[in-house]
Amino acid sequence: MEKTLQNFGKQCESAQTLGRGIRVSAQRVLIAGVGGSAFAGDVLRTVAQEADVYVHRDYGLPRLGKDALVFAVSYSGNTEETLSALQQAIQEKRPVVGISSGGKLEELCLAHHTDHIKIPAGVQPRNALGYLIIPMLNVLEENGIVGKQELGGLRKELEDPAIRKEGKRIAALLEGKTPLIYSSERMACLSYGWKTRVNENAKVHAFAHRVPELNHNELVGYTKKIGNFYTLMIRDREDSTRVRKRFDATKKMIEELGGECCIVDTRGSGLLSRVFNTLHIGDWASYELALRYGVDPEPVHVIERFKKELGS
Ligand code: PA5
């Protein structure tokens, strides 16, 4: 996985040629997928602010938004929830584009003359964010659904050695603790992305929540902590003044109640680069945490075993 993480900037650069030349017409966008593939939808919703983006993590498709462009996204192309969404989209003649590295999703698209974007195979879905999201951005940009995306300087920013260093620092804070990871509602993909990376790379529990909602429930849990937690708050410079105030007040209260907490600021030029850079810190933090726990960050045997059991 180390090599894959080192190549993440390169992946984002090479993905810029994917998904070109597809013609669609839609005002709204629906991403159907689960796990690492659906997560690309969460990131799209965060960065493509001018578009109306929904993420659907279930079988089939929601009844609402029949006019929305559906991206059926499955890195492997063999995930049953996503295949069922694609089948429904085809059946109901909804505008749909499939994205996968192959698998049944590609076969289904080919059989029904549906647009399909084939992305490179060979990495874990959570490490394929560039391949999963950039083609969607390309389709939306080329069809005037979102404005021009600033992807030019992304590779250089992602290759900054400070990102790995920051990940290593955070891994040291988290070792032996259960991470509680927070970000603002508008940047919810950051806390959720870090949580799932810790789950799948370091193979331990981690939980995510959002400001301001957590101030109305989770914060109370610090009164009688059962467990050894470490709270990480990911703050963005464009979070509103009131939300930023809540970050400081939340940290103060957690510490007063005896908890451990630190605030991590997003880094980067534009919104897209801040999201990618911060998720990449989460990649390295969870990778380094895996090394500290003596587990292989790459395979997710539990997910594979679960899918197999369900299949039988
Ligand atoms: O990270 C993982 O391996 C999972 O979360 C997968 O992304 C999830 O099981 C869905 O598989 P796929 O992305 O191939 O559709």
Image: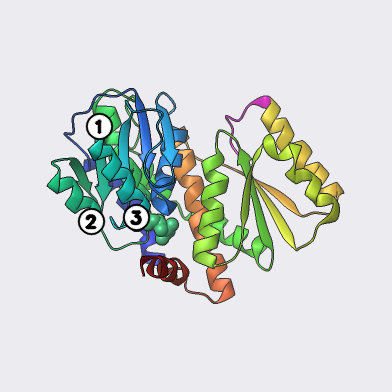
Mark toward the start of the polypeptide (3 vs 1): 3
Residue 95: x percent and y percent? 25, 32
The residue located at (24%, 25%) in the rendering is 143
The residue located at (24%, 24%) in the rendering is 25
Q: How far apart are marks 3 and 1 (CA)?
A: 20 Å
**In the displayed structure image, the side of residue 211 where residue 257 appears, left or right:** right
Location of the C terminus by quadrant is: bottom left
Mark 3, Cα crowd under 10 Å, few <14 / some 14-19 / many 20+, is: some
The residue located at (23%, 39%) in the rendering is 90
The residue located at (56%, 40%) in the rendering is 188
Task: Decide whether residue 40 is among the magenta residues.
Answer: no
Q: What stretch is highlighted in magenta?
A: 235-241
Q: Name the residue under label 3.
A: 80
Q: Is residue 128 visible?
A: no
**What's the amino acid at mark 2?**
Lys
Residue 152: x percent and y percent? 32, 37
**What's the amino acid at mark 3?**
Glu
Task: Decide whether residue 240 is among the magenta residues.
Answer: yes
Location of the N terminus by quadrant is: bottom left
